Image (spheres, helix red, strand yellow):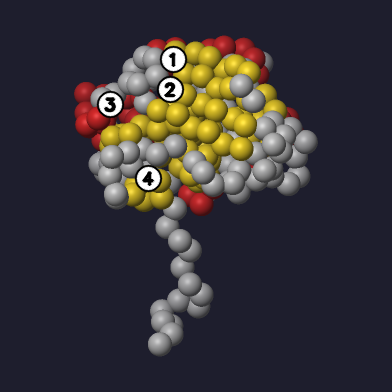
Amino acid sequence: MTDSTYVFAPPVQPSLRVNGSNSKFAVRRIYCIGRNYLAHIKEMGEADERDPPIFFQKPTDSIVEEGDKLPYPPATKDYQYECELVAAIGQQGKFIEAKDALNHIYGYAVGFEMTRRDLQKAAAKAGQPWENGKAFDASSPCSKIYPVNEIGHPSSGLMTLKVNGTLKQSTDLSKLIWNVPEIVVQLSKLYELMPGDLIYTGTPDGVGPVVPGDVIEGAIEGVGTLKMIVS
């Protein structure tokens, strides 16, 4: 019997595996923060480090789980990686106070915030939105979620990214300009956070291009790892 509720079948719910569980984390929204490491601000020639955080979103279905293909996107000649700590929201909240911010986090993950850098730069130069450079298909690879009850709340620890075994990015989470509780506070002033939301917390310096066949490996001390092959 055909279900006539919808004119076509609803899309599959994007989700991520949860470490130590058979359940999955259903992804609702993907929020990203720009210029959140001083060295990356300098690398990109951007504004002062204490400027208010820049938030933008990516499509929920841009999630790519480890083991899936990471396709090289169309319309770019400068496809770049950005390794980031990802905070997974597990409790609803708006206008969240700093003392309560960490209570809203279910767990953490390692994410790659993939970017069509040439399109992003062209949009920025023209004063246009970043969507073409940031919010494209398969632009949000993410590891499985590591729950807080297993790993706690990492506020320091080495984060690295390697391409074909060569170290490209290396920093400590303690160098975040806006730390995770501050990000949650600021973001909750703009949006009501809900279970299933992911927050990509920013990348350090060392961003650069990849091409088909490249192997990207990210690791965050105390959290986990993520490995993708560009196809």
Tell me what residue is drawn at x 25 percent, y 41 percent.
Answer: 91
Mark 3 or mark 1: name the one nearer the start of the chain: 3
| Secondary structure of residue under mark 1 | strand
Which residue, given by chain and number where applicable, does mark 2 sit on?
A: 220
- Rounded to the nearest angstrom, the CA distance separating label 2 from label 1 is 6 Å
| Secondary structure of residue under mark 4 | strand
Tell me what residue is drawn at x 63 percent, y 35 percent.
Answer: 115
Mark 3 or mark 2: name the one nearer the start of the chain: 3
Q: Position of residue 31 (x, y in %)?
A: 46, 38
Tell me what residue is drawn at x 47 percent, y 24 percent.
Answer: 219
Task: Tell me the amino acid under the disc marked 3.
Answer: Ile
| Secondary structure of residue under mark 2 | strand
Pick whichever, 158 or 11, lies toward us: 158
Q: Position of residue 63 (x, y in %)?
A: 50, 46
The answer to whether marks 3 and 1 mark residues whose Cβ atoms lie closer than 8 Å is no
- Rounded to the nearest angstrom, the CA distance separating label 2 from label 4 is 17 Å
Which residue, given by chain and number where applicable, does mark 3 sit on?
A: 151
The reply to whether residue 213 is visible in this rendering is: yes
| Secondary structure of residue under mark 3 | helix
Which residue, given by chain and number where applicable, does mark 4 sit on?
A: 17
Q: Residues within 10 Å of mark 2 (few under 14, many from 20)?
A: many
Which residue, given by chain and number where applicable, does mark 1 sit on?
A: 158
Q: Position of residue 203 (x, y in %)?
A: 53, 23
Q: Residues within 10 Å of mark 4 (few under 14, many from 20)?
A: some
The answer to whether marks 2 and 1 mark residues whose Cβ atoms lie closer than 8 Å is yes
Tell me what residue is drawn at x 47 percent, y 19 percent.
Answer: 159
Task: Tell me the amino acid under the disc marked 2.
Answer: Ile
